[in-house]
């Protein structure tokens, strides 16, 4: 599920939960306790997208990203805790027409 507000030049998303898995295999989410870090290895990513970032998610939760979302020349960065089951999703869009269009 994507963000509930339109993307802006600066992200204000902040993670509030981290995922766990029930024995049945269905994901569930446990609220983060202030001062308690989620398990995993710290990871910092930097990237650019031609042309616009629409969102970044770790395990289905939006993460805070620094950088201008609508400027592909500007590097964007974010950090999270990774485990062997971590899923990272980055969504963007290109302003050019599809190849062969027109």
Image (cartoon, rainbow, N blue to C red):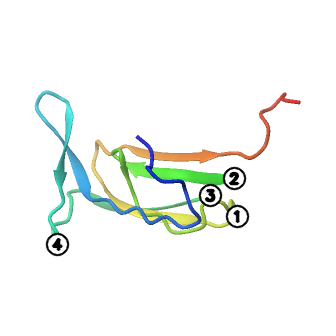
Q: Which residue is mark 1?
A: 73
The nearer-to-camera label among 2 and 1 is 2
Task: Determine whether, in the image, residue 58 is placed left or right of residue 95.
Answer: left
Q: Are marks 1 and 3 in contact (CB under 8 Å)?
A: yes
Mark 3 and mark 2 in contact (Cβ < 8 Å)?
A: no
- Disc 1 is placed on an element classified as loop
How many numbered badges does the structure rendering display?
A: 4
Q: Nearer the viewer, residue 27 or 6?
A: 6
N-terminal-most mark, 1 or 4: 4
Mark before the other along the chain sequence, 1 or 3: 3
Name the residue located 68 percent from the left edge and 59 percent from the top edge: 72
Q: CA distance from mark 1 to mark 3?
A: 7 Å
Q: Residue at x 20, y 65 (%)?
A: 37
Q: CA distance from mark 4 to mark 2?
A: 36 Å
Q: CA distance from mark 2 to mark 3?
A: 8 Å
Q: CA distance from mark 2 to mark 1?
A: 9 Å
Q: Nearer the viewer, mark 4 or mark 3?
A: 4
């Amino acid at each position: 599920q994507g963000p509930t507000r339109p993307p802006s030049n600066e992200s204000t998303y902040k993670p509030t939960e981290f995922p766990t898995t029930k024995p049945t295999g269905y994901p569930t989410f446990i609220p983060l306790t202030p001062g308690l870090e989620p398990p995993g290895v710290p990871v910092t990513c930097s990237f650019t997208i031609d042309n616009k970032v629409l969102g970044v998610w770790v395990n289905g939760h939006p993460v805070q990203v620094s950088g201008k979302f609508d400027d592909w020349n500007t590097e964007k960065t974010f950090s999270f805790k990774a485990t062997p089951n971590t899923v990272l999703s980055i969504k963007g869009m290109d302003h050019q027409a599809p190849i062969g269009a027109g």
